[in-house]
Amino acid sequence: MSDTIFALASAPGRAGVAVLRVSGPQAGAVLDGLISGTRPAPRAAALRDLRAPDAPTPDATIIDRGLVLWFPGPASFTGEDCAEFHVHGGPAVVSAMSEALLAAGARPAEPGEFTRRAFENDKMDLTEAEGLADLVDAETEGQRAQALSQMTGALKSLYEDWREQLITILAAIEGEIDFPDEDDVPDALSHTGAAPLGALIEALRDHLADERRGERVREGFTIALIGEPNAGKSSILNALARREAAIVTDIPGTTRDVVEVRQVRSGFPVILADTAGLREAADAVEAEGVRRALARAEDADLRIAVIDVSRETAEQWRALQPRLRAGDLIALNKADLEPGDASAGLSDADAARMVRVSAKTSAGLDALEGLIDEIVFERLGSRETPALSRARHRRAVGEALEALERARAQLGVHPELAGADLHLAVRALESLTGRVDVEDVLDRVFSQFCIGK
Ligand SMILES: Nc1nc2c(ncn2[C@@H]2O[C@H](COP(=O)(O)OP(=O)(O)OP(=O)(O)O)[C@@H](O)[C@H]2O)c(=O)[nH]1
Ligand SMILES: [K+]
Ligand SMILES: [Mg+2]
């Protein structure tokens, strides 16, 4: 029998209302021990005086007066008996309530323990539990939408559907292994499996080839500003951030560390990074700055090459071009100093992705922001199929895909080897939804939850 656990389900600190939640076989007894009067009807809120269960007399000083709710299992969030106390949200009330719950026999919950119990009682699969954690963490509209879709089963049904297809293919192939010489198992069976197996391989490939959209939505879309010293990278960062996030001076080599600004663009989290100017470094500190700038540019989802149009542009372009990828942006800065067309020195630059700006006069900055917002939306905006949202999903789908590809290669040759690989693929898919118990996976997933969830 499991313990009865409790936790503050609302945020700690001062608030209008605080919610304490209890789950486990003793939840009903804990509830009865704290309230005066009768246990309310299931799922109906009732006002009660609350007191410590070990108070000397029943009418001893009450802790608070609040709403209580009783959720008998299995029709509760965790599937167990649950109770909730909605009390006044002062730290002293919460601490006295916690003492009372301890005295009544409940113990403080571990992070994610309520959700883990819900998962173990089949109230949700692992991807839905992760979606719930993400919903609690969601700070932007795009994160909220992705988390909600995952919490309500979008990834679960995708993965469960793949698993079912796989089991059908497996049955066909194992039929061939078990009855190799019988007439009623046609030779073409391996080929019957080949088409659906090919389709499944394509589906997994597409799911993986999404440029980490779901992970970007969770973790942030990264943008790096790069360019030669004094091109105006920090000035542009500050303009986009609408604050003096980075130091700007007329001394080339001002920025050394990567300066990050977090923003919300098109409903998604974005991390803008200003970097050190690229040149032959004058000293070890600057050399490290340049190394970090290049590493950041390499890892970023989008690069903005900042070019100073008041100086020779061809030379700057030669240095930056190898760092850029298709779809990156070019900001032709200091347009206030050079009214002419400065793109002349930029051979092979994609004109559509080039904006003339002036961090000094703000000219062109709206257009630059418009382009950034568009790109963020293009890359992260929702599609028909749900995105995998964690490295854990990417690993498991990747494992399944490799096993399927090996199986396909063996299909007509060694069906028993193909069968073994398909079993591995099934297992990888089952680890995604938590169908197979992988204890350390569960520990890792639930430990990332907050306490009280
Ligand atoms: N006229 C004009 N000056 C600018 C513009 N943008 C930046 N500057 C000036 O150019 C100088 C360098 O700007 P920064 O923003 O520090 O340039 P940076 O690229 O971050 O330089 P490092 O950090 O040294 O690599 C400062 O004196 C800015 O005021 C612009 O659009 N027009
Ligand atoms: K500078
Ligand atoms: Mg700078």
Image (tube, rainbow, N blue to C red):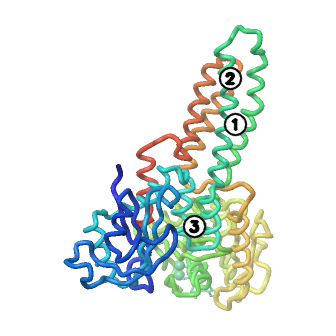
Residue annotated with mark 3: 220
Q: Are marks 1 and 3 in contact (CB under 8 Å)?
A: no
Q: Is residue 15 left or right of residue 431?
A: left
Q: Residue at x 62, y 56 (%)?
A: 212
Q: Residue at x 60, y 44 (%)?
A: 397
CA separation in Å, label 1 and label 3: 34 Å
Q: Residue at x 73, y 65 (%)?
A: 378
Q: Is residue 32 above or below residue 95?
A: above
Residue annotated with mark 1: 165
CA separation in Å, label 3 and label 2: 43 Å
Q: Quadrant of the C terminus?
A: bottom left
Q: Residues within 10 Å of mark 3 (few under 14, many from 20)?
A: many
Q: Is residue 177 visible?
A: yes
Q: Nearer the viewer, residue 16 or 222?
A: 16
Residue annotated with mark 2: 173
Q: Which mark is residue 262?
A: none
Q: Amino acid at mark 2?
A: Ile
Instruction: Tell me which label, 3 or 2, sits earlier in the chain.
Output: 2
Q: Residue pushed farthest front?
A: 38
Q: Are marks 2 and 1 in contact (CB under 8 Å)?
A: no
Q: Is residue 198 left or right of residue 155?
A: right
CA separation in Å, label 2 and label 1: 13 Å
Q: Nearer the viewer, residue 444 or 404?
A: 444
Q: Nearer the viewer, mark 1 or mark 3?
A: 1
Name which quarter of the figure residue 287 lies in: bottom left
Q: Amino acid at mark 3?
A: Gly
Instruction: Tell me which label, 1 or 3, sits earlier in the chain.
Output: 1
Q: Secondary structure at mark 2?
A: helix
Q: Nearer the viewer, mark 3 or mark 2?
A: 2
Q: Residue at x 36, y 81 (%)?
A: 49
